[in-house]
């Protein structure tokens, strides 16, 4: 399909119909309603302005569009198919469940859509070094992949605890020439890795670009990442028309920082008859520290340069988080999701570890697909929604990634649960 001019907001509105205020965000200060903005030390302000103007120049340059389109087609393998999960739908006994197969992308998830776009921007800005943070290692791998493709030196910050838990991704990053720097501060997980990447960036900003991995961080990151990921939703709209002659009734995606959900939802936002559902990590239950559901249980606050919902205590200190899926294990969420929650354009629910693990197994057995544990959260919610609908209804789920990385951990957790129940 024609990816040209994909990223131009004007073009997008006219092609998806019914433009609304929900579509023309953020404003020029990076606000989505009252959320978003740019809360950064002075040393980073110039770099963020430079990034913003490079981005606007790029999306108005047909050569940039062509280059990105070419990469998405020949390197990533886009468009990713829309797939009817027939046996899973039968099992639920309600609506048809369809998957948008981001798991089939090169590197196995949606993250590569963003890292290739931002790597191109890095070169346009004349910068020669890329840094990134990673939690589960998926964004780290996608960044290392883009850097290897272009021959750009790459440093990935990763919490020491995550380095231990995600060895295959650490190995793959190193094989592609990236340097992985374990972060020993704080909880030694994703939020500490972001802190450390920000610290590096403050000292290296003249020659270094920081590729953030989700729709979080200061303006213009939430907008740039959403726009690069929106290829998911735009393809889905076109494929829906081809495959079932109309738009789906409901679209579901999991929400960690919120990038696969934002990319899936954004092109649908103006289509107000399509119900949008975001699924957060319910972890082990709704007590503080046991989950990572920032929109469901958080309060507005500033984290990593942006105003959004944050899991925090009474003093505004960020709370610990938990999820069986490392990719959803983040105490904040992209500001556009906060905006969609408050304007009620998107409904946010959560799915706990147990349901996500069950769903992983069900999807494996009924469809022959190992979904990422993150994506299993979305499928679990979609199954509940589908069960209450009729066979004419269509529920479309973003299958954000493949589950090979989780298979060993899932098997271990299932054994553990079986043992505990005896
Ligand atoms: C990283 C990741 C997520 C969560 O990140 P978002 O920014 O919320 O999309 C979800 N699914 C997969 C497969 C991931 O790798």
Image: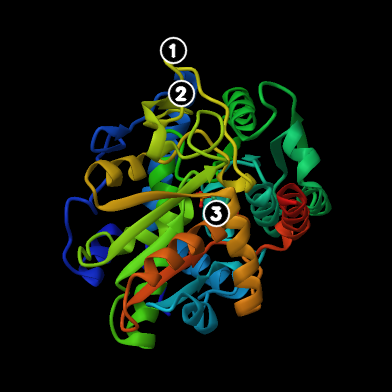
Q: Earlier in the sequence, mark 1 or mark 3?
A: 3
CB atoms of marks 1 and 2 within 8 Å: yes
Viewer-closest of 214 and 223: 214
Mark 3, secondary structure of its residue: helix
Q: Is residue 315 above or below residue 359?
A: above
Residue 72 appearing in the image: yes
Closer to the observer: label 1 or label 3?
1
Q: Quadrant of the N terminus?
A: bottom left
Within-10-Å neighbours for mark 2: few <14, some 14–19, many 20+:
many
Coloring applied to the structure: rainbow
Closer to the observer: label 3 or label 2?
2
Q: According to the image, label 1 marks what residue? A: 315
Viewer-closest of 414 and 399: 414
Q: CA distance from mark 1 to mark 3?
A: 41 Å
Mark 1, secondary structure of its residue: loop
Q: Residue at x 52, y 56 (%)?
A: 377
Residue at the front extreme, as displayed: 422
Horizontal side of residue 172 vs 65, given as left or right: right
Horizontal side of residue 276 vs 139, given as left or right: left
Q: Position of residue 301 (x, y in %)?
A: 38, 25
Within-10-Å neighbours for mark 1: few <14, some 14–19, many 20+:
few
Q: According to the image, label 3 marks what residue? A: 120
Q: CA distance from mark 1 to mark 2?
A: 8 Å
Q: Residue at x 68, y 52 (%)?
A: 147
Q: Is residue 300 above or below residue 162?
A: above
Q: Position of residue 154 (x, y in %)?
A: 71, 43
Q: Position of residue 327 (x, y in %)?
A: 60, 47
Residue 219 appearing in the image: no
Q: Residue at x 25, y 32 (%)?
A: 34
Q: According to the image, label 2 marks what residue? A: 312
Determine which quarter of the picture holds residue 401: bottom right
């Amino acid at each position: 399909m024609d990816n040209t001019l994909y990223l131009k907001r004007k073009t997008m509105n006219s092609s998806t119909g019914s433009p609304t205020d929900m579509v023309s965000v953020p404003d020029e200060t990076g606000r989505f309603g009252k959320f978003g903005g740019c809360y950064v030390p002075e040393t980073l302000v110039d770099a963020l302005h430079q990034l913003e103007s490079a981005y606007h120049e790029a999306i108005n340059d047909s050569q940039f569009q062509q280059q990105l389109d070419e990469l998405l087609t020949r390197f990533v393998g886009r468009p990713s198919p829309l797939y009817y999960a027939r046996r899973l739908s039968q099992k639920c006994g309600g609506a048809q469940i369809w998957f948008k197969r981001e798991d089939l992308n090169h590197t196995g998830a949606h993250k590569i859509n963003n890292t290739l776009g931002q790597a191109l921007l890095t070169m346009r800005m004349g910068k020669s070094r890329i840094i990134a943070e990673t939690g589960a290692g998926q964004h780290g791998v996608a960044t290392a992949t883009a850097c290897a493709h272009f021959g750009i030196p790459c440093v990935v910050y990763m919490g020491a605890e995550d380095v231990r838990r995600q060895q295959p991704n650490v190995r793959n990053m190193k094989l592609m020439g990236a340097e992985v720097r374990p972060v020993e501060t704080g909880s030694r997980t994703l939020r500490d890795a972001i802190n450390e990447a920000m610290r590096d960036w403050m000292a290296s900003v003249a020659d270094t670009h920081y590729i953030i991995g989700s729709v979080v961080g200061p303006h213009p990151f939430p907008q740039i990442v959403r726009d690069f990921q929106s290829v998911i939703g735009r393809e889905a709209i076109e494929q829906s028309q081809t495959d079932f002659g109309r738009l789906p009734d409901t679209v579901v995606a999991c929400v960690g920082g919120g990038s696969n959900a934002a990319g899936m939802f954004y092109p649908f936002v103006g289509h107000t008859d399509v119900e949008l559902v975001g699924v957060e990590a319910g972890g082990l239950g709704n007590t503080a520290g046991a989950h990572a559901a920032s929109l469901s249980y958080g309060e507005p606050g500033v984290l990593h340069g942006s105003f959004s919902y944050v899991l925090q205590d009474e003093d505004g200190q960020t709370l610990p988080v938990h999820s069986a899926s490392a990719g959803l294990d983040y105490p904040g969420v992209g500001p556009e999701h906060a905006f969609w929650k408050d304007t009620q354009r998107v409904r946010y629910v959560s799915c706990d570890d147990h349901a996500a693990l069950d769903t992983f197994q069900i999807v494996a057995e009924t469809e022959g697909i190992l979904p990422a544990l993150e994506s299993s959260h979305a499928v679990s919610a979609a199954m509940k929604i589908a069960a209450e609908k009729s066979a004419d209804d269509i529920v479309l789920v973003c299958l954000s990634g493949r589950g090979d990385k989780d298979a060993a951990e899932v098997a271990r957790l299932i054994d553990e649960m079986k043992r505990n129940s005896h």
